[in-house]
Amino acid sequence: MDLAGTTERAAVGQTEPLRRHRGGRPMGGRRRAGFVFSLPVILLVAGLLVLPIGQTFYYSLTSWDGITSTWVGLDNYRQLFSDSTFWQVLANNGILLASIPLAILIPLLVAFLLNERVLGWRFFRSVYFLPTAISWVVIGMVAIRFFASEGILNNVLRTIGLGSVHTDLLSGEFSAMIAVIITFIWSVFGTNTIIFITGMATLDREVYEAARVDGAGAWSIFFFVTIPMLMRFIQFAFILTLITAFTALFSLIFIMTQGGPGFATTTLEFFVFEKAFNNGVFGLAAAIGVVLFAIVFAIWIVQFRILRSRTD
Amino acid sequence: MNRTRRRLSRMAMFVVLCLVVVVMLFPFYFMTLTSFRSYDQYLAGSGFSLDSWAVLFDTIPVLRELFNSTVVTVGAVLIILAVSTTGGFAFAKLGYPGSAVIFLLLLAGMMVPVQSIIIPEYVNVSGFGLINQFQGAILVYAALGAPFATYLMTTYYRGISNELIEASLMDGASYLQIFMKVMLPLSVPAIVTVAVLQFIQIWDDLLIGLLFLQTPEVRTITVGLATLQSSRMVNIPALMAGSLVSALPAIIVYLVFQRHLVRGLTMGMGK
Amino acid sequence: MVYRRFAAVAFASAIVASLLAGCSGSSSPSPSAAASAVPAASTTASASAAAPATAAPPVAISLWHNYGTEANATATENLVKGYQALHPNVTINIVSQPANNYFDLLKAAAISKTGPCLATQWTGLFTLQNKAYLEPLNKYIPVATLKQFKGVEWGSDNFNADSGVYVVPLEMQTYNGFYNKDLFAKAGITALPTTWAELEAVDKKLKAAGIQPFVYGTGAQGLTAGFYPFYDLSYMMMMVQVSDWKKLYTGELPWTDPSIKAQLDKWVALKANGYTNTDVLNDTESWSQFLAGKAAMTLEGTWAISAAEKALGDKVGVFAPPFSDQPIKGIVEFPGDGFAMTSYCPNKDVAADFLAYMATPDAQKIIEDAGLIPGLQGTSTNDPLAKALLSFGADQGFTRYPMIDNVMQPEVADTAGKVLVAAFAGTMSTQDALQKMADALMQLPADRRSPSGYK
């Protein structure tokens, strides 16, 4: 049985069926058991997740203030797509998306280092995951002080002699986005590093030896051997990072930049919050939520096709 | 010559990793330092005082809210584990017509931002009278975390060889027995992984806690910390003290289970 | 096997935990508690220190606020204590709620009827937005009493107390400038500036003496990024009369009007000419920098008075930011927040009685002792800075303006909050900023811009 292929097909929901066997249970029993076992999660998610999602889809076609709703059809979407701010926000999500490879590459490199079993690697591994336990509020606060004009970054630059390079990242539109992205990469670093360390630990060392015997240098081993073999992990980390970036950065942005300067660091998720909660226009907010969901879903499907064809 | 080169490069790696540690742990340093200043000392930029810790414990019922957070988080995590292990078993090994589609839809549930669905969710839960009840929040958290957990468990279970299951079937075991005696024991690392990740996420959540648990008797610590702010002023040192207190349980959970965590992610992905 | 037991225990605990949770979680007092006991309690909800209701059945109501650790929280607690002393049968549960999302929480609580009887409300358009779940007080408290509160019309339907008062103001607040007297003296400044031109002169003198004139940043709030541009905007818009601010609401005076742009240009020039710090968008230490004497002036409000006095003593003074071509004659003096009664409160008489109690001299003293400026006509304050602020309107004939963010549509205010700071920081032109604000206004449906909505 090809386990690698199994995982691929599994990820898109196809099951490797148990073989028919002589004696024992009939096949129908397996199906029924499957249904019964999956019932709890189906009921839970259907009632408390799918239902509100469906309601959100419905409300996106209405004008709703939380109490009364009136049908407006595609008006919300029309208003959304003709709002120039929406396209700017979309572009911000694009920039965020483009930064995800970096959020994967850096932990990959560090995991590579750790895999070399440098002194104290177990300690490092423990420590790197700890920031995951810190709330976004604190991370945002520290980030502001880090990037501030009289902040830590500039202090460090001064002490290493680059005092002429004075930064004020949070004041500029594009640079504020950079600051947010740097903070975001920092915060997912721990999780992704752990994912890759464990991934590397499962790799067959023989392949490495064979490559080294063939005369490959460290970098080419990294790019042509390690990365392809880690593809499943990279995929997993990509999804996790993507979902975090698009649906969980709200608090960070709220503290760090409030979505500004202007709308420079407003992502779709933040935009939802603004419309829904600040302005009470829940119908429009629902529409934005639908759009966001569609985008994440599309990216997911796309990255599946891409990475799948590489490993087959 | 080669040995020296190797040693040098390993030392360089070590230095790099140490620098990374500094970068990673800096916020803890900041939190601790700031929490031991009074508000005036914080504005002034120096000083040591236990004032802000006093303000923290005076302003919010820290212990009560830590308890509430624990109840809600542990409750939700237990439910998530229960449904994701059973569901994972079903989707991984016990396919039935339509299960593939259902699985896909389940995964799609991971991709919806909470802000979008929170209002219909609130109205629904309120209709059942479960606002300000632990069960309401627990169920909502469980439903939100179930897709990711089921995804992980399903992937993990696929890696368990079918022969094992078929052998048990031939011995006449029921699927329930197979689940309890074969699947669960083998999946302890994955279970721990799910538990730790979900624990942290639920513990730190603000929005659902705010709306579904509105009063201090049932409020979580994360929401409680938010009451240290008003629209015009915030007592930052007290907030830092509170953040430290709030971060502790998650850190403890992680450190205790970290060995299993690593194994869980390995087994889940590697097969 | 160990694992089997583990699994069994896990499943069992899940169920037990939920059950336990259910038991301990249902102890929250619901508003429908002692509903039937109401009619027996005080039927006359008239003002003045009512005689304690003897042998009245116990009543419990809740009060939500979002004051955090501010002085307002202390004032609230002491007011409740004072009232409970007079009415021993009444218990008012005070719940502090997070300031962020506070109004959404109230809305949600109104839907599920799990909210309080009394809640902090902001005045101006905020009140009107939330009036769906608020109860007009005119039936419970005589209008004459209510009108004793200065600015009570801003918390009323149609901005007219006779139409129905929703919010009883807790305090009087101002937006104002603080300045460091020592630094001014050092630069040889003898009189406070009253026009743009005089401000320019003052700034130049300060710079010549090596002093940074203004500091902008997150201010006393210190947590989230960005500065709050509405102190400045309020003073910039004093070039029109109070009643004409309605035209900003309806669009009759568009945000892109050249007169507004002229004001904005002069304001933005403050930073461009180097009279402020450069990191206006993310200086989280701006308030402590002012307190430490690193800058001569900053904009804040009454809530910052006690910190200012603590740090600078009598070296700090207050002024009205002179963002005007003619000598400035306006001060933002406004009852920004107070308490309102919800429409689903089951003990309305008791709740209204508490609100009436706030008009008593005892209550006003409690408010003043907490460091706030009492909001009733005829009250005064002992705090020197607060006195100075009140005297602008009371003695010097300044016009009292509301806080402009309380009378703008939230969508426009949100946009303004972003684009004005961007313009000040120099990353956006004033033209673009005003255009975005005008767009935000015009995108609203007509009923959100109609004169009938500005009340």
Image (cartoon, coloured by chain):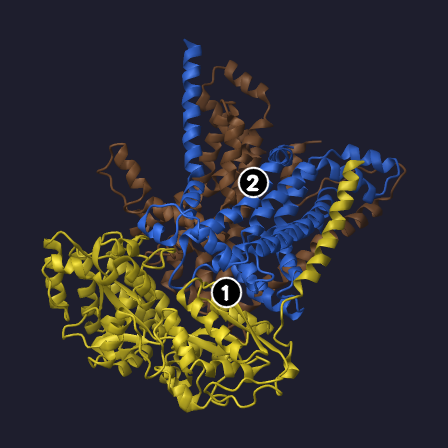
Task: Name the one closer to the observer, C393 or A96.
Answer: C393
- Is the residue C120 above or below the residue B226 in the image? below
Q: Nearer the viewer, residue C102 or C447?
A: C102
| Tag 1: amino acid | Gln
Mark 2 → mark 1, Cα distance in angstroms: 38 Å
Q: Image point 39% across, 58% down: which residue?
A: A87
Which residue reaches farthest top?
A: B1
Q: Residues within 10 Å of mark 2 (few under 14, many from 20)?
A: some
Label 1's element? loop
The colour with which the image depicts chain C is yellow
What hue represents chain A? brown
Q: Position of residue A232 (x, y in %)?
A: 57, 36
Q: Is residue C350 above or below residue A16?
A: below
Quadrant of image for the C terminus of chain A: top right
Q: Which chain is blue?
A: B
Residue A110 place in picture, x, y as percent: 47, 30
Side of B34 where B127 appears, left or right:
right
Tell how many labels.
2
A303 sits to left or right of A96: right
Instruction: Establish if A128 lies above or below B60.
Output: above
> Residue C453, labelled with which disc?
none
Say which quadrant the N terminus of chain A sits in: top right
Residue at which label 1 appears:
C97
Pointers 2 and 1 within a single chain? no
Answer whether labels 2 and 1 touch (C-beta < 8 Å): no
Residue where numbered disc 2 is placed? A236
Give coordinates of residue C405: x percent, y percent: 34, 71
